[in-house]
Image (cartoon, helix red, strand yellow):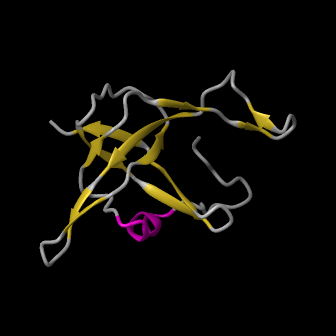
Amino acid sequence: MLYNRTTSNSSLFTKEEVLRAGMSAELPFLSCGVAPEPQHPWDSEQGKYDLTKVSGYGFWVCQDVEDLDGKVYRQNPVLVVVPNDEEKLTFGDQVTFDELVGYYSRKKHIFRFQAKKIKKVK
């Protein structure tokens, strides 16, 4: 689900949180999911997710990162939510994201990620 804070112009999601999670938003990711997962919006009045609507699609990706010393780190898969599922991916495709941002929940101790668009690397 794409989150937009309605009480302020600022967002909980930032580029710095992507770096804090040990990933680079500029480097390509590997698709490691079978299919995009529909994300449903929260209905405050009913106190549950509205399963009749789709607010975005989640793509499972991971990233190999090499530091300055040449040591390679393999990242665990993360779910990145984008507004649509126009890009058809298969397992192992390289992808990049437009405006990838993240959020860390101190209450639940988890990261969440979202982007404006996903693109397959040719």
Residue 120 on the magenta segment = no
Q: Position of residue 55 (x, y in %)?
A: 59, 33
Q: Quadrant of residue 46?
A: top right
Q: Is residue 89 above or below residue 44?
A: above
Residue positioned most to the bottom: 69
Which residue appears at 17% of the width and 71% of the height? 71
Which residue appears at 49% of the width and 64% of the height? 14
Q: Is residue 84 above or below residue 76?
A: above
Which residue appears at 38% of the width and 26% of the height? 86
Tell whether 118 sits left or right of 107.
Answer: left
Tell whether 8 sits left or right of 118.
Answer: right
Q: Write down the region rendered in magenta.
A: 14-22
Q: Is 57 in front, or is 70?
A: 70
Quadrant (top left, top right, bottom left, bottom right) of the N terminus: top right
Q: Position of residue 93 (x, y in %)?
A: 23, 36
- Number of residue marks: 0
- Tell me which secondary structure the magenta stretch mostly adopts: helix
Quadrant (top left, top right, bottom left, bottom right) of the C terminus: top left
Which residue appears at 78% of the width and 36% of the height? 48
Tell whether 47 sits left or right of 17.
Answer: right
Q: Position of residue 96 (x, y in %)?
A: 28, 46
Q: Is 117 in front, or is 21?
A: 21
Q: Quadrant of residue 39?
A: top right
Residue positioned most to the top: 52
